[in-house]
Structures are given as structure tokens and as C-alpha cells.
């Protein structure tokens, strides 16, 4: 039986509430406490629960966040809600009072004390946000008061950024600031979003760079000459498996299974980009590579770094060094090895379905951007069509067609 949206809040009743339906148009489902007027509980699609007080001030409907359930108990929420209701009864709008009190908070303070804590609990890319903020946003806006930065300041700032940075890089900065202000509004630290309306820049289509057979040979030769043995093995492993950069870095010996009595070999990846796990079937070249790698005692990672017990920390630096020695362009990315793996599958006659499962995509639509056929493969396909037509015509009719003026 579905829980009514109006009931007397108790710890047991709240903890029994399911996450909001993922198919719901509303991000959060709202429940009302029968004991305290205006006290609400919002339950998100991820199961996160928070208290809210709804009230009227100067004939306007308002709401103010009380805090997340857990750190805030039902008793705490009722006590705070009643204190705020007393304030409202005297003609004071608690939300406006909070905004006034919090208007002194700087962007740095909001990011470090509020946004980053939230990001670490709710998204895997929190460290990326931290790096992006410190590199691009902290210096120009960090010391500024969150409420005082205007829309008119942001667009010129990003226009200037675009002169030296790619469209995708600048757009990620805009997205980060937009998300920060959305949360600042939701939590009562800002009454507007100055990023709203800032135009993003047109991004070029995804880069498609596939290594040729000669380039692969040169890359492997250059890797063998590198001073960082484990980084060289890591680079080869990515191309042989089509794995993502972080999947390769996090690879551990305990997740490799090589059968003694068969050619089957599996690599278990506990968590992929989508948050799911998957198995990678290893080819014989990848198995030979793994069996040749020297293990470091006490380090669980296949590609250990200089820090005891940790994996390689900066594979990009080693890759650039190897690529340069191989005579490849400076713009070549580590991710292009993944492109190349998909290309090799298709050029060998594999389907998009094969690419999807080899690279761990959720659909063939994602695989399609990696699966461009080489010119040689297209020529072979075209020749096959020609041969079939010639066979259908027969030699006599075909000769007549060729002889036509």
C-alpha cells in the first residue's frame, strides 16, 4: 500500500519512504507532517531526504530549507520549524533574513563548505569539479561575495576565456557555475542565478583519430624504449582492451582471471563510467602482456606508481613522451587508443554490437561514433558489391555493358 503524502513524521516512517519514482516529472516528492503546520519532507529520486518549511509572508507563498534528514532529526526539524513560525508571526520573513545574513558568504566559502561536500556525496566527478574551480574560477571570482556577482560580468569573462581555451573547456566552467548557483538558490545562499542566460559556445564534433598499423607498431616500439616500464605496459594495455583511462589505472591483479586449461581470460571492472560493473574478454596479446608484467609486492594494482600501494598517478605525461618518440602528433590523446580499438574491431569485420560490448557502451548509438570504417575496408565492401553485380549479370551481359559507348 502506497504511503500517504500526509502523515505524522516519525523516524521509522521516514526511513521506510522509497525514493521518488525515476519516471516522475518532479525531481522530488513532497510529504507533509500532520503535527507541525508547514513542515515538509522532500524525497529525491536518489533517496535523499530533506526538511522544508512552507509559509506565507506578505501574501506570498514562500519556502525555506531546514536541512537534510539524518543530520537533522524529526525532533530537530519540528523545533526549528516552530521557531521560524514564531518569527513569521512577528512579520519577519526568515528566508529573506537568512539571505541577508548569508550575503557575506564568498564564492570560495560556498564552494568549499557547501558545494564540494554535496558533490562528493552525489557525483563521481567531484575531484574534476574541484580542479576546474581552482584552475579557472577561484582567482577571478573566489574572493567575491556570491550575491554580488552579476550576470553582466560572466558573459564577457567567458568570451575572453574562449579566445585561449576550447569551447568544451569553457562550457564545462559555465555548467559548473550554473550548478553552484542552482544549489545556492535551493539552500538559501542566493536569491538569483546570474549564470542563467549566459550563452555556451558551439562545440566541434567529437574528434575521430585512429592509429594505422604502422603507427601502432611505432607506438609499441617507443613504449618499449621508455624509462617508465609500467606506464609503457599501461599504454599497450589500453589499446589492446579499449578500456577507459581510469579503468586501466584502477585495474587490480585480483580482478584478472586466466583459465589454465583454456584460452579464456577475463578482466572484471567493478565500476565503469556509468557506475555499473562489466567483464572484458582479454585477447591473447593482452594476456601475454599481463603475464610478462612484474608484480610489486604489497601493491594490488597492475600498473603501480611511485607511491607505495598506489597506481600510476600521471599517465598523460608518459603517453605524451612515448607518442613523441613514436613520431605522432602532439595533439594525440590517450583516449584515441580507445578510438583505435573500436576501429580495429570494425575493420576486422566486427559489428557495432561487438564494439558496444568490447568498449562497455550502454547502446550501439554510443559505439557508432567510434566505429568509422577505414578507407581500405570501404574499398573491400565496394568491391564485394561490384562482384555480386557482375555475377548477377553474367559474363556475356557484363561484356555488353562494358562495350557500350
Image (cartoon, rainbow, N blue to C red):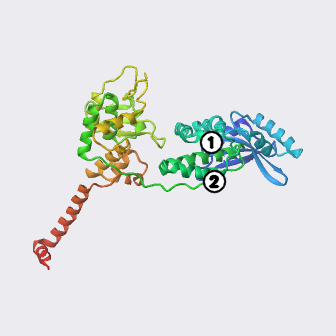
In this view, the residue in front, 210 or 269, is 210
Give the percent coordinates (x, y) of residue 324.
31, 39
Residue 223: x and y in percent read 29, 34
Q: Are marks 1 and 2 in contact (CB under 8 Å)?
A: no
Q: Residue furthest right?
A: 90
Q: Extreme bottom residue here?
A: 405
Q: Which residue is mark 2?
A: 196
Question: From this viewpoint, which residue is outermost toward the top?
Answer: 297
Local secondary structure at mark 1: helix
The image quadrant that residue 115 belongs to is top right
Question: Along the line of sight, which residue is nearer the eye, 43 or 203?
Answer: 203
Q: Secondary structure at mark 2?
A: loop
| Quadrant where the image shows the C terminus | bottom left
| Label annotation for residue 141 | 1
Is residue 285 found left or right of 97 in the rendered image?
A: left
- Residue that appears at 55% across and 41% down: 136
From this view, report whether residue 109 is shown above or below residue 163: above
165, 292: nearer the viewer: 165
Q: Is residue 70 visible?
A: yes
Q: Report the number of numbered marks.
A: 2
Q: Earlier in the sequence, mark 1 or mark 2?
A: 1
Q: Position of residue 45 (x, y in %)?
A: 61, 46
Q: In this rendered view, identify the residue nearer to me: 22 or 289.
A: 289
Tag nearer the camera, 1 or 2: 1
Please state the horizontal and vertical placement of residue 256, each as a whole percent of the image.
35, 31
Amino acid at each position: 500500500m502506497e504511503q500517504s503524502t500526509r502523515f505524522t513524521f516519525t523516524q521509522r516512517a521516514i526511513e521506510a519512504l522509497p525514493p521518488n519514482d525515476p519516471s516522475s516529472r518532479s525531481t522530488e516528492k513532497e510529504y507533509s507532517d500532520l503535527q507541525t503546520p508547514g513542515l515538509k519532507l522532500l524525497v529525491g529520486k536518489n533517496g535523499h531526504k530533506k526538511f522544508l518549511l512552507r509559509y506565507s509572508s506578505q501574501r506570498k507563498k514562500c519556502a525555506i530549507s531546514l536541512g537534510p534528514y539524518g543530520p537533522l532529526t524529526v525532533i530537530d526539524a519540528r523545533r526549528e520549524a516552530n521557531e521560524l513560525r514564531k518569527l513569521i508571526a512577528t512579520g519577519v520573513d526568515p528566508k529573506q533574513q537568512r539571505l541577508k545574513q548569508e550575503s557575506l558568504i564568498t564564492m570560495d566559502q560556498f564552494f568549499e563548505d557547501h558545494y564540494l561536500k554535496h558533490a562528493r556525496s552525489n557525483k563521481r566527478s567531484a575531484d574534476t569539479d574541484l580542479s576546474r574551480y581552482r584552475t579557472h574560477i577561484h582567482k577571478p571570482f573566489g574572493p567575491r561575495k556570491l550575491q554580488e556577482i552579476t550576470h553582466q560580468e560572466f558573459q564577457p569573462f567567458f568570451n575572453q576565456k574562449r579566445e585561449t581555451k576550447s569551447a568544451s573547456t569553457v562550457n564545462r566552467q559555465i555548467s559548473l557555475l550554473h550548478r553552484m548557483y542552482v544549489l545556492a538558490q535551493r539552500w538559501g545562499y542566493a536569491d538569483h542565478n546570474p549564470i542563467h542566460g549566459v550563452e555556451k559556445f558551439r562545440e566541434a564534433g567529437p574528434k575521430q583519430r585512429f592509429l594505422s598499423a604502422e603507427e601502432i607498431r611505432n607506438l609499441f616500439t617507443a613504449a618499449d624504449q621508455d624509462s617508465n616500464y609500467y606506464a609503457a605496459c599501461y599504454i599497450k594495455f589500453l589499446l589492446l582492451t579499449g578500456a577507459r583511462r581510469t579503468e586501466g589505472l584502477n585495474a587490480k591483479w585480483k580482478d584478472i582471471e586466466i583459465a589454465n586449461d583454456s584460452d579464456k581470460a577475463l578482466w572484471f571492472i567493478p565500476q565503469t563510467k556509468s557506475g555499473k560493473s562489466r567483464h572484458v574478454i582479454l585477447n591473447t596479446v593482452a594476456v601475454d602482456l599481463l603475464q610478462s608484467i612484474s608484480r610489486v609486492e604489497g601493491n594490488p594494482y597492475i600498473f603501480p606508481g611511485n607511491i607505495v600501494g598506489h597506481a600510476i598517478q600521471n599517465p598523460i605525461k608518459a603517453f605524451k613522451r612515448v607518442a613523441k618518440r613514436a613520431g605522432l602528433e602532439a595533439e594525440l590523446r590517450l583516449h584515441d587508443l580507445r578510438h583505435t580499438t573500436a576501429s580495429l574491431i570494425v575493420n576486422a569485420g566486427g559489428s557495432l554490437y561487438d564494439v558496444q560490448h568490447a568498449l562497455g557502451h550502454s547502446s550501439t548509438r554510443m559505439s557508432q561514433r567510434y566505429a568509422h570504417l577505414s578507407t581500405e575496408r570501404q574499398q573491400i565492401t565496394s568491391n564485394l558489391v561490384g562482384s555480386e553485380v557482375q555475377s548477377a549479370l553474367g559474363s556475356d551481359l557484363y561484356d555488353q555493358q562494358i562495350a557500350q559507348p
